[in-house]
Image (spheres, helix red, strand yellow):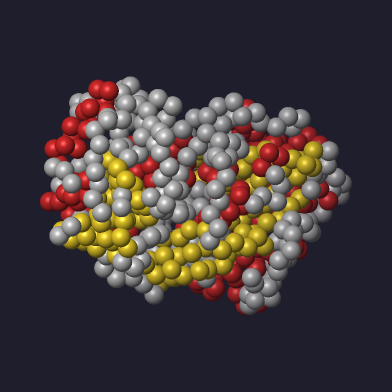
Amino acid sequence: MRISFLTLLLAGSVGLSSFSAQAQGKVKVKTKTSAAAPAADDAAVTYAGTITAADLRQHLGILASDAYEGRATGEKGQKMAADYLAARFRELGLTGPVPGGVSPYLQPFGLVRYAPDGPGQLRVGPQTFQAGRDFVGFGPSPFRTETKAEPVFLGFGIETDKYSDYAGLDVKGKDLIVLQGEPTDGRGHYLLSGTKQESEWSSTFRKAALARDKGARSIFMITFAPGATFGPMAESMGEALSEPGYELTAPVRQPLTGFMLTEAPPTGIGSYLTSLDLGAALLGIGPQELGQYVVTAYQNQQPPKVVFTPRAFTATLPQLRTELASENVLGLLEGSDKKDEVVVISAHYDHVGIQHDTIYNGADDDGSGTSAVLELAQAFVKAKAEGHGPRRSILFLLNAGEERGLLGSDFYTGHPVVPLAQTVTDLNIDMVGRTDKRHSASERYLYLIGSDKLSSGLHALSEAANTKYAKLKLDYFYNDPKDEEKLYYRSDHYNFARHGIPVIFYTSGLHQDYHKATDDVDKIEFDKLADRARLVFFTAWELANQDQRPVVDSNKP
């Protein structure tokens, strides 16, 4: 699961032979047989029973071993894992649906890693402001060498039907200056929502994403924190923001349906938070004038006609850029009479690699989900071989780049092997091998996130499948829009959801070993992992075989 950036800002081509036999071990294709094929009514239970803790342990013991070096996207260990997974899909007899390339099971994509490459500064007239003290940045730098800029002030950087700072303006290639937050009366009432609840436009990332989509080169967002306050805040964020960032080499820019990323930095634009002092210097005004602008915007219910004349600045924000190659792993099981429609079952197989000379094996995150997908694949393959194949096709999708910004699933949804219009749903499995602090060791539970956000029918089917078969406690704690962890936005299902495709995100929750070197195989509860994987199997079984696909009838945050 991708780590959240939200808390930082609350204050303002490889062949199949490349992995070693010693590392991969010997994994046999399941050849379990029965005296006779099961009756249709019993088939789901029969094939779910082939998902076992022993098989999950075997897969995970390989994927989360030190030999795979933490499976960092674009690095050696991730390539080894991709080969292992592709080999399993091939052995099962799944179709490789990717045309051309090294392997029909591998969907290659390029990405760029960028990291600070020395101290950065911004000069406005005689004043010099330092990165990490007066402003912080995320995203690719457009100022890698000394660059002069003539910025444009754009109010709050908001665009809605009733309130737009972009009306009549072309900002392609421009450097924008906007205010953080949104119009308020100063007493907690927000103009856009009409209540004391802020709207999505209070999201720093929402504004940056819109500016990116409008073609802007950069966006500077002025906080209302003076230097004395902003400095310590910037310092506290500095370590996290100094970590390398990643984006696709060829970012996907398809129109989205009803969703916009608000909880993670957008790619493709340099984005900066500034102190109030730097903001005032950029606009050539006193800090108090910005406060008056906020109140005037609320009173007028439109962007004020007050025009600030931004001052030119010179920025030097050096950044080292490295191109990497990665790949998703895909296996397709063809359906029968509804084979043109597809149910996607996904997980991410990458993790965070080696940090400070220590291997982070990512057994739960997301070796557990990846192993579960392999077991679901063998169960559906066996069912089809014995005359109980799915009506709809099933795509087993193992993404890379999730930890770097949901990049693999972003690339897949931009380059799908089955058109998105024919994609029924995505069942995404991420971290399903542990017990969190909210549940007892004996509890048979699983968190479900997103099942009702786009389709009430999917939610009803999910509940019915659990009642009929798995009988787990379905916990919707993290499905609440007010969830502080914002888990709905932090795994690969979200890239399907923002294209209007119904999703369910399955997880057993966060724990003390999350994104630590201690997330190892010896802490995985394999019986629970098998139990949870069977629930996903039952849900996928129902989705793949029912007459009608889930209807999109909602758009919940």
Residue drawn 48% across the image and 58% down it: 247
Horizontal side of residue 195 vs 276, given as left or right = right
| Residue 46 visible in rendering | no
Residue 440: x %, y % from top left: 43, 43
Residue 71: x %, y % from top left: 52, 66
| Residue 326 visible in rendering | yes
Question: Residue 135, relative to residue 157: is it above or below?
Answer: below
Residue 218: x %, y % from top left: 37, 52
Count of numbered tags? 0
Residue drawn 47% across the image and 40% down it: 260
Residue drawn 66% across the image and 42% down it: 420
Horizontal side of residue 491 vs 165, given as left or right = right
Residue 430: x %, y % from top left: 53, 50
Residue drawn 55% across the image and 39% down it: 256
Horizontal side of residue 155 vs 208, given as left or right = left
Horizontal side of residue 380 vs 1, given as left or right = right
Question: Residue 315, relative to residue 471: is it above or below?
Answer: below
Question: Residue 447, relative to residue 128: is it above or below?
Answer: above
Give the camera-side residue of 191 and 505: 191
Give the camera-side residue of 100 and 91: 100
